[in-house]
Image (cartoon, rainbow, N blue to C red):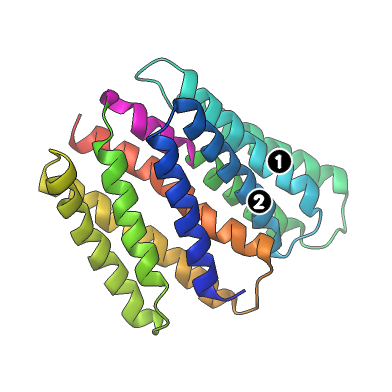
Amino acid sequence: MKPWSIGTIGLAGLAAIIAGGYSAPEVLLAVVALTALGVGIGWPHFLGIPAKKTLAALIGLPGVGSAVAATYLPAPGFLDWTPAFIAAGVLAIFVMQLLRGTGQSQRLESTLGSCAGVLLSCLGAGWIACFRFNGVREMFLVAAISAAVALAVGLIRWPDRVVAPLGIVGAGLAGPLAGLVFSGIAVLPAAVVGVVVGAVLVSFRRLVILHGEPLNFPAALGMGLGPVAAVGSLAYFIDKLLIY
């Protein structure tokens, strides 16, 4: 699949998260959990490492646990259990690699890459925390609109040296605009969220381009949903630092 297809998957995942946010909390939980599982399934395919089914479970399940915890933990500790789930996933990956035994192919790449996948999977819980924080949806919406703009710019089939700055600037402008139109968030925190979200998403686009090889659907699924999951936690922590 081509890079623009990955952006389309990311936009679809983002749309599902927004729809879940404006539905019942259980719907948002289901969407974030499915996003984590999608990252788990696709990340080993993108890395091209062995033991894909086992690693899919070890990457995706901690993200599901983190999402469940973020949904039901009392405020303000929405992500208090997220580090524990990340640590559990990383530990499980190390144990799995030890059980594979010495002399197996790509052990180092598999270990390091899978640990990064666990982190992305668990960071998706940030969308739930962002939604529950202060009982309002302003930053949730600002982050989602900024991400949508960055992903949409990434669909343009121009050189990366043009698309990358355009995506960052577009997201950086979309954040304050969304904050002014749809919420009462000040321009500065909305702009910071937009720029950070845009930078993360265009970085993943660059990663796909550097990969070079054609991607199958599971790999495209993981690369499309991974950065979308990550920006949820970024928006939540920026919300706490600049607004709370």
Tag in front: 2 or 1: 1
Task: Estimate the x, y position of residue 218 in percent, counting from the top left.
Answer: 68, 60
Label at residue 66: none
Q: Residue extending furthest top?
A: 74
Q: Is residue 128 magenta?
A: yes
Q: Nearer the viewer, residue 159 or 207?
A: 159
Residue 65 quadrant: top right
Q: Residue 213: x, y in percent?
A: 65, 78
Magenta stretch: give its range.
124-135
**Quadrant in which the C terminus appears:** top left
Q: Are marks 2 and 1 in contact (CB under 8 Å)?
A: yes
Residue 238 seen anywhere in this rendered image of the structure: no
Find disc 2 in the rendering and name its residue.
114
Asked whether the viewer can see residue 122, the reply is yes
Q: Height in image: 196 above or below 205?
A: above
220 displayed left or right of 231: right
Residue drawn at the location 26% of the way across and 54% of the way down: 194
Q: Residue at x 35, y 70 (%)?
A: 153
Say which mark, if any, is on residue 58.
1
Instruction: Say what amino acid the circle numbered 2 marks.
Output: Ser
The spot of residue 120 in percent (x, y) is: 53, 47
Asked whether, in this view, residue 153 is left or right of residue 104, the answer is left
Task: Decide: is 205 above or below 212.
Answer: above
| Number of residues whose C-alpha sits closer than 10 Å to that of mark 1, classed few (under 14), some (14–19) or many (20 or more) | many
Which residue shows up at 70% across the image and 61% down it? Answer: 45
Q: Earlier in the sequence, mark 2 or mark 1?
A: 1
From the image, give the main secondary structure of the stretch colored magenta: helix
- Count of numbered badges drawn on the protein: 2
